[in-house]
């Protein structure tokens, strides 16, 4: 039996299909790797890239080669791959942050050569234990090195998975004859050139057509979120099978899934803050739910061959992102829909991600200066005390600096120290500006795609530099008669508008101060907030500048300088639904030097509507920096030390404490603690808007 025949027999076994055969390019890819070459395989999602490295691993192991090291970007991808590896008789293991209890056992198996394929995330390459206990011993024994979703090296390597940049350094430590496989479905010529630069210009390129014949693409411009939600509620029940609705933000995933549930559509939200994501994946795989409403957290590697539809609630920022996501649908069915909706918020969200992809130069300078002044280094919490930067900003900057070569910082236990490279370190601003320009061009390309009169599949293929692009014959522009309806029911849209206006946000009470003995002026102490100083759970009427009431709140704060009576009525309605128990007996508000009458006027009108007394008993006792300029919990709480005092007008019953915006919750926390100290039995925080970043 030839090697190819042996490989085909394993393929049939893996797929449990005696009639299975290699797709065009699969055996050619395996053959290149068996010859010890480096290959970049660009094929559409569902083509069978995983079979290439599983079968190659099987054949190499039979020849006595060492294990395969597979770098995969998402844990969901790892779970699917582990199951596939077992079907072909391979012993596969993964080392990741969720299975720490098994690390030692897996390391022992590796030393005994009992593991055929080891799957890791790119972040694992930054882990000291992994580098010392696993990677060091594997370096000279690896049989095959696989980089799955290799476009991350170039296209996502900075603002999505910066640890992918470590891969090149790992390769440099390995023998030059180790075969290397890089796979992706989303690489245009620019990305291919970048991958070749990093992996070597002797890279063998194996590219196939990216067209998916079963997928019917359609673009629909519906600016209003309420109208798009109405469209979803009408159309999804008419679609066969189950599918995915993609949103750009977590809060939209939560909100859209709740809306679909209200409309008797089984739906759940899926994003990085959802704990049991594997359970949700299995529910979708088993058709136990109609739709997952997901962010990019459900992306690369999720494989459901019979997925009937992928709908985008908002426009993704690039063709790469869009093709990768819409390509989840229609892998093993005759007909599937890929619908791209477009809304008024799309550009704002895309610009947010572009502008926050890299740490600004000033953050880098601030962190390096702080580390340079410290003899023993600083942990992230300690950096928060000395720098007015968000924790996420500090962590993003540290991540960026650790992948620089040479790195200007290094970690010793929990602390970061500046290295000799910090003295002359300069960020490559020209490179960052160039990448941002690319992102903006990709955004413009998606705008063009949204309104293109040409074949939509051919547009995507051409944008990804597929040399085999042809008209699909079944997209919105090729065959208009195959369209889904593009209109929406006005009555349902009105219901969606009401839903958005009643999408009240909880304000959870903080229970710990960011540091012990933080306050030197205010009569507050300790590490935990005392039980007799805690606020109750509160509510925010809206999300800042969002559909519903958020834009009206913004207009009142910055344009008319008066909150409309509509907001008073809306807050009365919210209080009825919220029904805090015991009910508030009086109302007060957070004072402001900048707009001294804005909130007091609103609170007074709300008090009249509720037939409660308004008592402005909180006084601003110091002109501190505006709270919105404080970036982390330590700075935010410290900035309020001595900012407020409670005068003698304070009442003792339950109080409704009002602010226009809530972000960190520290203003509410400090003011509530002072009110409780003054004798108030309960404090219910209420804000007109919750300010939260638009991020996954």
Image: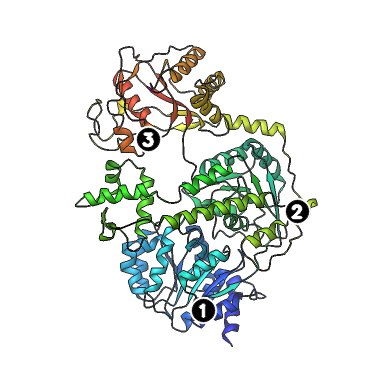
Q: Name the secondary structure under disc 1.
A: helix
Tell which tag, 3 or 1, sits nearer the viewer. 3
Depth order, front residue of 567/387: 387
Which quarter of the figure is the N terminus placed in? bottom right
Q: Which residue is located at x 33 percent, y 72 percent?
A: 136
Q: Mainly helix, strand or loop, the magenta region?
A: loop
For residue 670, above or below residue 23: above
Q: Is residue 149 visible?
A: no
Quote the CA–CA distance across marks 3 and 1.
55 Å
Q: Which is nearer the eye, 425 or 82?
A: 425
Any part of residue 448 in sight: yes
How many neighbours does mark 3 have within 10 angstroms: few (below 14), some (14-19), or many (20 or more)? few
**Dot 2 crowding, Cα within 10 Å, few <14, some 14–19, many 20+:** many
Give the x, y percent position of residue 560: 52, 22
Q: Which residue is mark 1?
A: 33
- Residue 348 position in % (x across, y down): 54, 42
Pick whichever of labels 2 and 3 is earlier in the sequence: 2
Mark toward the start of the polypeptide (3 vs 1)? 1
Name the side, left or right, on which 299 lies relative to 626.
right
Horizontal side of 165 relative to 457 (left or right) equals left
Q: Give the class, few, some or many, for how many residues have Cα within 10 Å of label 1's Cα (few <14, many ≥20).
A: many
Residue 255: image x %, image y %?
A: 56, 39
CB under 8 Å between discs 1 and 2 = no
In magenta, the rendered stretch is: 589-593
Q: Which residue is mark 2?
A: 477
Residue at the far right in the pictured view: 481
Q: Which mark is residue 629?
A: 3
């Amino acid at each position: 039996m030839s090697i190819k025949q042996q490989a085909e027999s394993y393929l049939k076994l893996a797929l449990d299909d005696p009639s299975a055969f290699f797709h065009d390019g699969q055996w050619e890819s395996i053959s290149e790797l068996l010859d010890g070459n480096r290959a970049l395989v660009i094929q559409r999602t569902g083509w069978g890239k995983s079979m290439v490295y599983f079968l190659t691993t099987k054949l190499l192991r039979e020849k006595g080669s060492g294990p395969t090291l597979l770098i995969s970007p998402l844990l969901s991808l790892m779970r699917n791959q582990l199951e596939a590896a077992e079907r072909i008789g391979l012993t596969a293991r993964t080392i990741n942050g969720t299975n720490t209890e098994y690390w030692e056992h897996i390391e022992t198996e590796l030393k005994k050569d009992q593991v055929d394929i080891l799957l890791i995330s790119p972040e694992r390459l930054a882990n000291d234990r992994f580098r010392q206990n696993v990677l060091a011993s594997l370096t000279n024994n690896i049989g095959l090195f696989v980089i799955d979703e290799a476009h991350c090296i170039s296209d996502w390597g900075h603002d999505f998975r910066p640890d992918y940049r470590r891969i090149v350094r790992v390769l440099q430590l390995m023998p030059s004859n180790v075969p290397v496989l890089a796979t992706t479905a989303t690489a245009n010529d620019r990305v291919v050139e970048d991958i070749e630069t990093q992996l070597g210009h002797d890279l063998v390129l194996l590219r196939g057509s990216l067209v998916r014949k079963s997928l019917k693409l359609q673009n629909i411009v519906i600016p209003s979120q309420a109208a798009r939600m109405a469209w979803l509620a009408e159309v999804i029940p008419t679609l066969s099978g189950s599918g995915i609705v993609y949103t750009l933000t977590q809060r939209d995933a939560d909100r859209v899934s709740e809306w679909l549930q209200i409309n008797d559509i089984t739906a759940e939200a899926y994003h990085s803050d959802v704990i049991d994501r594997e359970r949700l994946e299995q529910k979708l795989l088993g058709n136990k739910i109609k739709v997952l409403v997901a962010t990019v957290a459900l992306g690369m590697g999720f494989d459901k061959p019979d997925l009937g539809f992928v709908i985008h609630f908002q426009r993704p920022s690039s063709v790469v992102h869009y093709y990768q996501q819409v390509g989840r649908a229609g892998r093993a069915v005759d007909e599937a829909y890929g619908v791209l909706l477009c809304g008024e918020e799309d550009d704002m969200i895309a610009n947010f991600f572009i502008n926050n992809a890299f740490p600004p130069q000033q953050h880098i300078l601030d962190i390096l200066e702080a580390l340079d002044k410290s003899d023993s280094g600083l942990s992230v919490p300690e950096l928060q005390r000395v720098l007015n930067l968000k924790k996420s900003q500090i962590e993003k900057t540290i991540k960026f600096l650790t992948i620089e070569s040479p790195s200007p910082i290094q970690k010793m236990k929990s602390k970061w120290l500046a290295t000799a490279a910090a003295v002359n370190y300069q960020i490559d601003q020209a490179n960052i500006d160039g990448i941002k320009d690319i992102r903006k061009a990709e955004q413009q390309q998606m705008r063009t795609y949204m309104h293109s009169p040409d074949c939509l599949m051919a547009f995507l293929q051409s944008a990804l530099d597929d040399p085999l692009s042809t008209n699909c014959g079944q997209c919105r522009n090729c065959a208009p008669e195959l369209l889904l309806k593009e209109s929406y029911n006005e009555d349902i849209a009105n219901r969606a508008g009401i839903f958005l206006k009643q999408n009240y946000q909880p304000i959870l009470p903080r229970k710990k101060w960011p540091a012990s003995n933080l306050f030197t002026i205010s009569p507050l102490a300790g590490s935990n907030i005392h039980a007799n100083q805690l606020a109750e759970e509160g509510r925010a009427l809206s999300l800042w500048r969002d559909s519903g009431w958020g834009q009206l709140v913004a207009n009142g704060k910055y344009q008319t300088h008066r909150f409309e009576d509509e907001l008073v009525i809306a807050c009365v309605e919210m209080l009825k639904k919220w029904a805090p128990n015991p009910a508030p007996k009086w109302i007060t508000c957070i004072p402001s030097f900048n707009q001294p009458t804005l909130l007091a006027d609103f609170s007074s009108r709300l008090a009249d509507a509720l037939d409660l007394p308004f008592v402005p008993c909180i006084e601003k006792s110091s002109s501190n920096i505006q709270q919105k300029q404080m970036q982390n919990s330590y700075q935010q709480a410290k900035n309020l030390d001595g900012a407020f005092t409670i005068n003698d007008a304070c009442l003792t019953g339950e109080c409704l404490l009002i602010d226009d915006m809530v972000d960190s919750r520290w203003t509410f926390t400090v003011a509530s603690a002072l009110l409780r100290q003054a004798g108030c039995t309960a404090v219910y925080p209420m804000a007109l808007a919750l300010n939260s970043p638009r991020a996954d």
